[in-house]
Amino acid sequence: MVKRYRLTKEKIKNEIKKCGREPVYFIKNYCKISHPEKGLISFKTYDFQENLLQDFNDHRFNIILKARQLGISTIVAGYIAWLLLFRREKSVVVISTKFEVAANLVRKVKAMINHLPDWIKIATINVNNQTSFELSNGSWIKASSTSSDAGRSEALSLLVIDEAAFVEGLEDLWKGIYPTLSTGGRCIALSTPNGVGNWFHETYVNSQNGSNDFHHLELPWSVHPERDKVWFEQACRNLSRRDVAQEHECSFNMSGEGVISPEDLEWIRSSVKEPKYRTGFDRNYWIWEEYKPEYTYMVVADVARGDAVDYSAAHVFKIETMEQVAEYHGKVNLDMYSVFLDGVGREFGDALLVIENNNFGVSVLDKVIELEYPNLYFSMKGSHKSITQLEAMNNNSSIAGFTTSMKTRPISIAKLEEFIRNKQVKLNSRRTSEELATFVWRNGRPEAQKNKNDDLVMSLAIACWVRDTAIDMAVKDVNYNKAMLDSVFVASTKMSNQIPGQLGYKRSLDLTNDSRQLARAQYGWLYKG
């Protein structure tokens, strides 16, 4: 470090020029940071941090997928300190998951400037607040909330989004704040991963594909030169697999608070394949396998209005194996959807047709009944117990279709998770896989991420519930009745109480051998189906 007492005016001038040209030189030689054990120390940068500073200069938009504890927020603070000090009239806004987190980054920048040698402070702080400050050269920085009007009133030189993957509603916020960067402003978005489907994930993936202006950079734990496998194993000892992926491995797919575990999502993705046919009036009906008469099938459908943000969705499954053989996902009017479902069900051998009876579903059900579909799912009001279409006739307590309620929704989602965890369902669809990846816990409730859909997920959950509850229970009822009938013996006063070989035994009076056949003849009505 260059000592103040050795500098002449000419050397001071040259040092200031060099610092103004090279942020790496400025930070390494003059910035100080607070260490939890050593106190105030010089900021000695690593190669990966210096490369990052170069990226900040070379690219307007930077997005950084990072592990924890790499000092990325601190190097960003050093870059901001350099920008404010050596550039006039620069405006910087910092947003984060919480206002306090953004304010903490502002305080880091202020501390770096305050601890600089006096001779290098070519601009001084003349407006000083807890969460913002302004320099005498007109440059300023402030922490901002994540409300929809954040940063809207200023033309920004730099926007910093810290922990961007965790900022709620960042999609809408970005739409509002992006125009403030249109005059040449820059953006640095940095975060550990938090699942897929959010703004940070999609922006990062799009930057990899070259479909936006962001320069992407991935910084896993291993970029730190002082960390090795021993350090990694120790750091991960008390973390779950999901936490390890999020904190250290920069894995989008394995991180996040998804309803379906990262491992199960990976398993689902491994089975995804392109459909054999893309057909239907809008080519959104995907078929992987045609009807096979040796199998029985189930069609489960969710109904949307057809002109809103939601989609109508339907799955076709083999009941025996729970393999997905066809799927529909599109926007269609109710009459067309009714005819479509009727046709799909008949195409797959008069499959059991399960339609969610929400507001719009009732209209579809009425139309399907009018079309005289022969194998429609019915249940009992209140208990949700499934009954056959024949039983539902003249039964005032029966209701057509599946009722999604406060009671059945969590149960069906739990059944979905169970089926996937136990690998009891085989999914072929990329569309379903993508929806499952963005089906997350939000405020304790399982639902789609903001601006995502869960129509395929919910119809899949209903399919799992019906397969396990309605169909399996029906089979169990039949088996129970068979077992009961097999245990029935017909009593008769004429039946011999002797056994063969005993004195007085008469074979003509021994009905034990024929009792099962007689029981079946008398009580056959107990069998279902």
Image: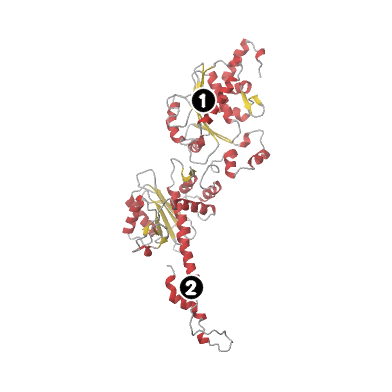
Residue drawn at the location 34% of the way across and 57% of the way down: 368
Label 2 neighbour load within 10 Å: few <14, some 14-19, many 20+:
many
The earlier-in-sequence mark between 1 and 2 is 1
Q: Quadrant of the N terminus?
A: top right
Q: Position of residue 113 (x, y in %)?
A: 57, 20
Q: Amino acid at mark 2?
A: Leu
Q: Quadrant of the C terminus?
A: bottom left
Instruction: Identify the disc placed on residue 187.
Output: none
Quadrant position of residue 310: top left
Residue at which label 2 appears: 485
- Outermost residue on the front side: it is 493
Q: Is residue 355 above or below residue 476?
A: above
Q: Position of residue 118 (x, y in %)?
A: 60, 15
Relative to 175, is 234 on the left or the right? Answer: right
Along the line of sight, the residue nearer the viewer: 169 or 381: 381
Q: Position of residue 517 (x, y in %)?
A: 47, 77
Q: Is residue 180 above or below residue 470?
A: above
Q: Amino acid at mark 1?
A: Thr
Q: Is residue 220 visible?
A: yes
Q: Position of residue 489 (x, y in %)?
A: 50, 77
Along the line of sight, the residue nearer the viewer: 450 or 481: 481
- Outermost residue on the bottom side: it is 504
Relative to 174, is 244 on the left or the right? Answer: right
Q: Are marks 1 and 2 in contact (CB under 8 Å)?
A: no
Q: Is residue 291 visible?
A: no
- Outermost residue on the top side: it is 9
Residue at which label 1 appears: 131
Along the line of sight, the residue nearer the viewer: 360 or 331: 360
Determine the secondary structure under disc 1.
Answer: loop
Residue drawn at the location 45% of the way across and 60% of the way down: 470
Label 1 neighbour load within 10 Å: few <14, some 14-19, many 20+:
some
